[in-house]
Image (cartoon, rainbow, N blue to C red):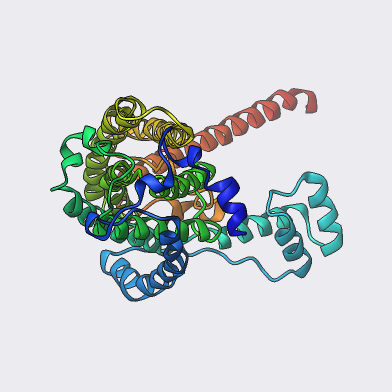
């Protein structure tokens, strides 16, 4: 297996610039440590450690903190026990078709209306609670905040933090500091844990984009370490962490219905995201890997592969920036952020009986809107009743002469 890997996977032309071999980058003990693929083996047990730590964090810290902030969960009507409908629901979670509803009604002896109501209640049972979403956001907030502070502290005094040409000076024979090695290991372990938990986390509208982001990030971190793109890789991770913890903090206060705090944090997040992901990332990081690096070596496979991953991330940045700008538009013209454009697919209740639970407490504007709609419907109904009475009276009057 080792011979096969050395023959196919670790070919020098894949990982090193032309004219440089593995023997040319061997470092002495006093020169530092060159990154090796086996160094990343610790990310696998670390990913499972993150999952266990998250479980403890959510129950010891996140849940009590959510209660302190006043996070409330909707009270939903549970669907009555029905083995046949439950088996169909687990087999296909989609909305049953009209023919399927008729068939299920015959099997269970229920009307079509009751079958539809059962499926509405059953779907609402599986929708994530605000507490679950709060715990998920608080866990990511804690990691991103710690990672950003630690990453900034380890990079603030490095020459390539200020001059990006230093990322390539002496490449590929560049030693890796121990702090940057652990920065890589913890980031990769965390994203691996997110990928392992993606099936149980809250499913959002950008679910596919999130999976692509996690996979691209893992490939980016792993390949950049093996190809010794560590200096640029640390800058990429720092740019991402700078806005992620702001987004998660805004979500936490959104679930707690702290509207003003949530809106303020969202505005700050939007500014930081748009600047770092649409200006700093493409203008400095991608530019230095795509253009500046050619001043120090000729392009090779690793150059094209690494830049392709960066461009995939930039495409996702543009997609998320579009969603954020839509929310900024709503905030500017409606006075508040009505809803998260990336909101989870399973969060909106579709049962008419639970419709009133969609509105957070204290939202007088939404209540007035609903009250006005109800009043208009009542007025319309009253008018219809009056018109019907007048019509009936005219008919009775018109028939009286004939009766005489």
In the rendered view, would you say 71 is above or below 226? below
Please give the count of numbered marks on the rendered protein. Answer: 0
Splitting the image into 4 quarters, where does residue 284 fall?
top left
Q: Nearer the viewer, residue 130 or 137?
A: 137
Most distant residue in the left direction = 157
Q: Residue at x 68, y 54 (%)?
A: 93
Does residue 75 appear to the left or right of 88 in the view shown? Answer: left
Most distant residue in the front direction = 23
Q: Residue at x 25, y 46 (%)?
A: 242
Q: Position of residue 272 (x, y in %)?
A: 24, 38
Q: Is any part of residue 264 visible from this angle?
A: yes
Location of the C terminus (image quadrant): top right
Splitting the image into 4 quarters, where does residue 322 fall?
top left
In the rendered view, would you say 319 is above or below 194? above
Q: Position of residue 15 (x, y in %)?
A: 46, 41
Q: Residue at x 60, y 55 (%)?
A: 3
Q: Position of residue 25 (x, y in %)?
A: 35, 47
Q: Nearer the viewer, residue 205 or 176?
A: 176
Q: Nearer the viewer, residue 342 or 226?
A: 226
Does residue 10 appear to the left or right of 235 in the view shown? Answer: right
Q: Residue at x 64, y 65 (%)?
A: 79
Splitting the image into 4 quarters, where does residue 373 fall?
top left
Q: Position of residue 210 (x, y in %)?
A: 48, 46
């Amino acid at each position: 297996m080792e011979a096969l890997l050395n023959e196919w996977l670790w070919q020098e032309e894949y990982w090193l610039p032309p004219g440089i071999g593995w023997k040319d980058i061997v470092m002495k003990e006093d020169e530092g440590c060159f990154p090796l693929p086996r160094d990343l083996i610790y990310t696998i047990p670390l990913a499972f450690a993150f999952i266990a730590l998250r479980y403890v964090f959510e129950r010891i810290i996140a849940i009590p903190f959510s209660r302190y902030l006043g996070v409330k969960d909707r009270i939903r009507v549970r669907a009555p026990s029905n083995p046949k409908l439950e088996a169909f629901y687990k087999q296909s979670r989609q909305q049953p078709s009209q023919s399927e509803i008729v068939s299920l009604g015959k099997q269970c002896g229920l009307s079509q209306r009751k079958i539809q109501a059962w499926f509405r209640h059953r779907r609402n049972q599986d929708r994530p609670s605000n507490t679950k979403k709060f715990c998920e956001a608080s866990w990511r907030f804690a990691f991103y905040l710690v990672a950003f502070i630690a990453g900034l502290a380890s990079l603030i005094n490095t020459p390539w933090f200020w001059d990006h040409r230093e990322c390539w000076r002496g490449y590929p024979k560049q030693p890796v500091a121990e702090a940057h090695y652990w920065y890589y290991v913890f980031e990769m372990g965390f994203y691996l844990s997110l990928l392992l938990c993606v099936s149980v986390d809250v499913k959002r509208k950008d679910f596919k984009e999130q999976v692509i982001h996690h996979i691209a990030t893992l490939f980016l971190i792993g390949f950049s370490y093996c190809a010794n793109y560590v200096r640029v890789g640390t800058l990429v991770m720092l740019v991402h962490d700078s806005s992620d913890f702001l987004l998660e903090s805004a979500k936490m206060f959104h679930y707690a219905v702290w509207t003003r705090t949530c809106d303020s944090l969202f505005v700050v997040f939007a500014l930081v995201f748009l600047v770092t992901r649409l200006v700093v990332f493409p203008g400095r990081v991608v530019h230095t890997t795509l253009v500046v690096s050619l001043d120090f070596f000729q392009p090779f496979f690793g150059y094209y592969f690494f830049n392709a991953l960066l461009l995939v991330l930039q495409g996702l940045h543009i997609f998320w920036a579009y969603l954020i700008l839509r929310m900024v538009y709503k905030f500017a013209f409606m006075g508040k952020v009505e809803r998260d454009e990336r909101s989870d697919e399973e969060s909106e209740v579709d049962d008419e009986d639970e419709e009133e639970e969609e509105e957070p407490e204290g939202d007088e504007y939404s209540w007035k809107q609903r009250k006005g709609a109800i009043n208009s419907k009542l007025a319309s109904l009253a008018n219809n009743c009056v018109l019907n009475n007048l019509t009936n009276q005219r008919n009775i009057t018109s028939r009286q002469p004939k009766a005489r």
